[in-house]
Amino acid sequence: MNISIPYKNKVIEAVVDCLVSKKADLKEKHWIVLTHGAGGDLKTPQLSAIASLLSDKGFAVLRFTCKGLNIKYRINVFTEVLVYLNKEYEPKKICIGGRSMGARAAVMLTSDNKVFDFNPVFKKITGIICLSYPLHKPGNLNDLRDEPLKKSKLPIFFLSGTKDEMCESNVFENVLYSMKSPYKIHWLDGCTHSAKPVENYQEDMYCAAFKDISDWCLSM
C-alpha cells in the first residue's frame, strides 16, 4: 500500500507492507519503520526483503524514501513519519531503523532523551534495527560515529558484514562492549557494507539473519 506523508512543502513517499490492508485493521499493530541509506530509496532490495518477511510474520512495516545527505534533515523527516504514523494508525508499539545512514538517523533520533517528551509516539518505540551501521568512513578509524550508540537506552539489533569497510568488526565490538543499552549482533560472514558477500552468495545466510530480526522484534 502506497502512502504519501506531508512534510513542509513536499511529501514523503512511503509503502506499507502488511497481511491486512484496511486502515481499521492496521491500527493497534506492532509496526516496523525503516528507511534506506545515502544512495537508496524505499525499494532498496534489503529493505524490501526484510519488509516482506516481517509482514508475513504479522508486523505492519512502513518503508519511506528520504533523499538527502544531511543527517539532521534525515532525522527531522524520520520524526515527521513517526508522528504521522501515530496520528493515522495508532500503533501499539514500534521498532524503528534503517540501512547505513538510515540506521544512523534512527539511533541519533532516539539517543536524545528530550525527544521522548516531544510526542507520545516516541514512548511507543521499543527497539532499533541497524542494517550495516556506518561506524566510520572507509579507512578512517579515528573518527567513530559511536556517541549516539553509547547514549542510546533502547535495545538495538545490528546486522553487519564481517568485511564491512565502514564498520570494521574488531573496532565495532569494542564499541558494543561500551554501550549501556541491550544489543544483539548478527554477523553476515564475508559481506561488505552493501551486505553482499565478497565471494559466493548464500541464501541460507540471509534467511537466518532475517529470521533473527523477526524473532528479536517479536521479543520487544
Image: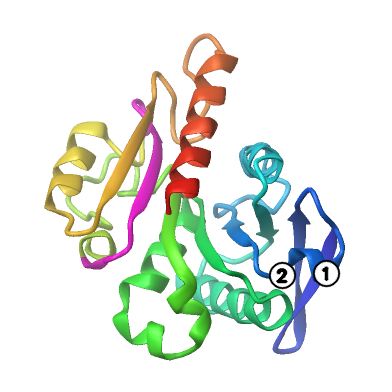
Depth check, front residue: 135 or 209: 209
Q: Amino acid at mark 2?
A: Lys
Q: Quadrant of residue 127?
A: bottom left
Is 137 one of the magenta-colored residues?
no
- The image position of residue 172, as x and y in percent, is 23, 41
Is disc 1 in contact with disc 2, using a CB cutoff of under 8 Å?
yes
Name the kind of residue labelled 1 in the image: Lys
Q: Element at badge 2?
A: loop
Q: Which mark is residue 210?
A: none
Region of the chain picked out in magenta, as a range:
151-164
Where 145 falls versus 56 (above or below)? below
Q: Which residue is mark 2?
A: 27
Q: Position of residue 205 (x, y in %)?
A: 50, 19
Q: CA distance from mark 1 to mark 2?
A: 7 Å
At 34% from the left and 26% from the top, the residue drawn is 162
Considering depth in this image, is 139 or 119 the residue closer to the camera? 119
* Residue tagged 1: 23
Residue occupying the point 81% across, 70% down: 24
Q: Label 2: few (<14), some or many (≥20) within 10 Å?
A: some
> Does residue 20 appear anywhere in the picture?
yes
